[in-house]
Image: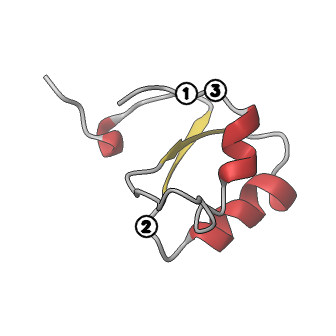
Amino acid sequence: MQMDVDDLDLPGVSVVKLTGSNNFAVKKLLSADDLTGDYLVYDPLSYEKDQHDDWLLDIKLYSEDFPR
């Protein structure tokens, strides 16, 4: 059974979904606005091999990754 990210109930964790048009806002949230919050970032987007379009690559490199 596959669960939708919208159905997750994670106490104390904010779920953020990348849409392709909110990448800058999410980057700002995670790297400047809220440095102490716990977030699960759902990224259904795919990026080209050079990764230049991935605004959150630096955050992904130091964060824990959960397979889909």
Name the front one of labels 3 and 1.
Answer: 3
Circle 3 sits in a helix, a strand or a loop, which is it?
Answer: loop
The disc labelled 1 sits on which kind of residue?
A: Pro
Residue picked out by circle 1 = 11
The disc labelled 2 sits on which kind of residue?
A: Thr
Residue 21 in percent (x, y) is at 49, 77
Residue picked out by circle 2 = 19
**Number of other residues with Cα within 10 Å of mark 2, as a class: few under 14, some 14 to 19, many 20 or more:** few
Circle 1 sits in a helix, a strand or a loop, which is it?
Answer: loop
Q: Quadrant of the C terminus?
A: top left
Q: Which mark is residue 64?
A: 3
Residue at horizontal 40 percent and vertical 56 percent from the top? 46
Circle 2 sits in a helix, a strand or a loop, which is it?
Answer: loop
Cα separation, mark 1 vs mark 2, equals 23 Å
Q: Relative to 12, does residue 14 appear above or below in the rendering?
A: below
Cα separation, mark 2 vs mark 3, equals 20 Å
Within the image, what quadrant is residue 50 found in? bottom right
Residue 59 in percent (x, y) is at 73, 45
**Number of other residues with Cα within 10 Å of mark 1, as a class: few under 14, some 14 to 19, many 20 or more:** few
Cα separation, mark 3 vs mark 1, equals 18 Å
Residue at horizontal 37 percent and vertical 33 percent from the top? 8
